Amino acid sequence: MTAATQPPTLPPRPLRWLFLDLNSYFASVEQQLQPSLRGRPVIVAPVGSDTTVAIAASIEAKRYGISTGTPVWEAKQLCRDLVVTPARHRAYVDYHDRIVAEIERHIPVTRVCSIDEVACRLLDNENDRDSAMALARRIKAGICERVGERLTCSIGIAPNRLLAKLASDLQKPDGLVVFEAAELPAALYPLGLREIAGIGAKMERRLQRDGINDIRQLCERRPRDAGHAWGGTNGDRLWYLLHGVDLPEKPTQSRTIGHSHVLSPGKRGPEPVRLTARRLALKAASRLRRKGYRARLLVLHAKFEDDKSTWRTSIKLPATQDSFVVLQHLDRLFPRLHAAGGTRPGGFRIRMVGVTLMEIEPVVGEQGSLFASLDPDDPLARETRGLALSRAMDRINERFGRHAVSVGPLGGGRIDRVGTKIAFGRIPELDEFHE
C-alpha cells in the first residue's frame, strides 16, 4: 500500500457522547397526563379536523403504520380504535424542562437538540462502556420515577455526537445502543446511506453518481476522495465522523424568526387568513425584540387546499424590530396572495399561512432616538413611537397574559386561536406563551 492510498492514522476515540431521544414524545406526554389513553393508539393533532396531520403518534399507533405526518383521515382508516387528542404545546415544554432537569441530576446537558432530543458529553471517568451504560440506565430510571412512567427514551452512546444520535435511532422504544471505536466503521455497514443524518435523497443520488452506493464504499475511500464525492467545503468531514473522530462543532446562528398556522376548515377565506397572518407577524416581531434582533426581509408564505407546494412572496424591510413597520409591509403583500388565490380552481382556500422575518442581525450599541422630540406627525417620530409602543405591548402581555393587548381585531369568530407551537428543531421559551 502506497502513502497515497494508505488510510490516515486516527486519534484515540473514546466514548464521548450520550444522545437521548424521547420516544413518541408528545403522545407519551398525553398518555402521562391522561391515564385513560395508556396502552391505546393515540395521535396528537394541531386542530380538530380530519384534514390536518398527526404531529405525533404513540408507540401503539405506530404499530398500525401511523407516524408523524400521517393525515388524520388516513390514520383513522388504518386504526379504527384510534384516539385523536389536541396538542398542548405548553405542557410539552413543561415536561421538556422537567426531563432536562432530571438528566442534569446525572450529567450536564451539553446541547438541547430539539424538544425531544438532548446530547451530553461524557467525562473521562464515565466514558468506558460499562460506566456509560450504567449512567444511561440511571437516567432512564430517573425520568420514569421523577417525571413520568410513560416517558421512555432511547439512548445512543458513541465517540461523537453524529454516531450517538444514529445509535439512539436503532433500537426503539426504550433502547440503548453503544458504538465503540473498535467496531467502527464496520458496525455501520448494514445501514442505508439515508440513515446517516445529513444524507437525504439528493445527496444519496450525488454519491451514487460517484460510485458510492453504501456506507462501506464511502468509508473505504480515502478521506479526500470521499469528500470529493460529497462536494462542498470540508467534504471529508463525514468520513472522519463515521470512523468515530470527534470533530469540533460548526458554529451556527439564527437567521430567521417566523411562525405558521394551519387554519380550521371554516376559516380559510381571505379575511381570516389576513388576520391570522397579522397575528403571526406580531408574534414574530415580539420574538425579534426579545432576542435583540432586527430584520431586513419579510416573507409571507401559504399552502392552498388544492396544492401541496408552498406559495411565497417577500418584501424588503428597513432594518427594524417595530411591530407596526412589520404590519405595514405585510399589508402590501396581501394583494399578491389574493391574486394568486383568484387563479385557483377552488377559489381562495388556504389551509396554512406563515410569516417569517429574515436577514436578521443583532441590535448592538443602540442609542436613544434623536427624533423623539419632533412633531408627533413627523414620520421619524412615528417610527420612534411605534417601537416604544411595541415594547410596551410586550411588557403588558408578559405581565397579564397573551392577547392582553394587541393590534387590530382578534374576536368576532373570524380568526383561529393562534397559540405557541413547537417545531421539533426549536423549543419555545416560556415567554412565547404570552405573545
Image: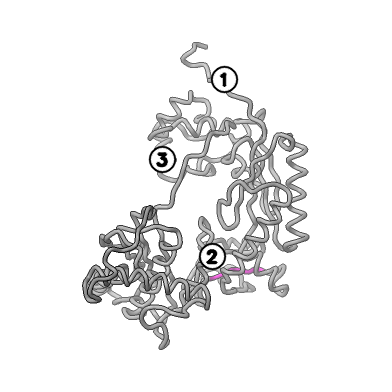
Mark 3 and mark 1: Cα distance apart in space = 30 Å
Image spot of residue 426 (x, y percent)? 51, 57
- For this rendering, which residue is in front, 29 or 1? 29
Q: Is residue 186 left or right of residue 292?
A: right
Q: Nearer the viewer, mark 1 or mark 2?
A: 1
Name which residue lies at 48% across and 32% down: 237
Q: Is tag 3's residue or tag 2's residue first in the polypeptide sequence?
A: 2
For badge 3, the amino acid type reads Arg
Mark 1 and mark 2: Cα distance apart in space = 45 Å
For badge 1, the amino acid type reads Thr
Mark 3 and 1 residues: CB-CB less than 8 Å, in contact?
Answer: no
**Disc 3: which residue:** 205
**Disc 2: which residue:** 55
Q: Secondary structure at mark 2?
A: loop
Q: Which residues are magenta?
A: 41-45
**Disc 1: which residue:** 9
Q: Is residue 321 left or right of residue 163?
A: left
Q: Secondary structure at mark 3?
A: helix
For badge 2, the amino acid type reads Ile
Q: Is residue 70 left or right of residue 318?
A: right
Name which residue lies at 73% across and 52% down: 105
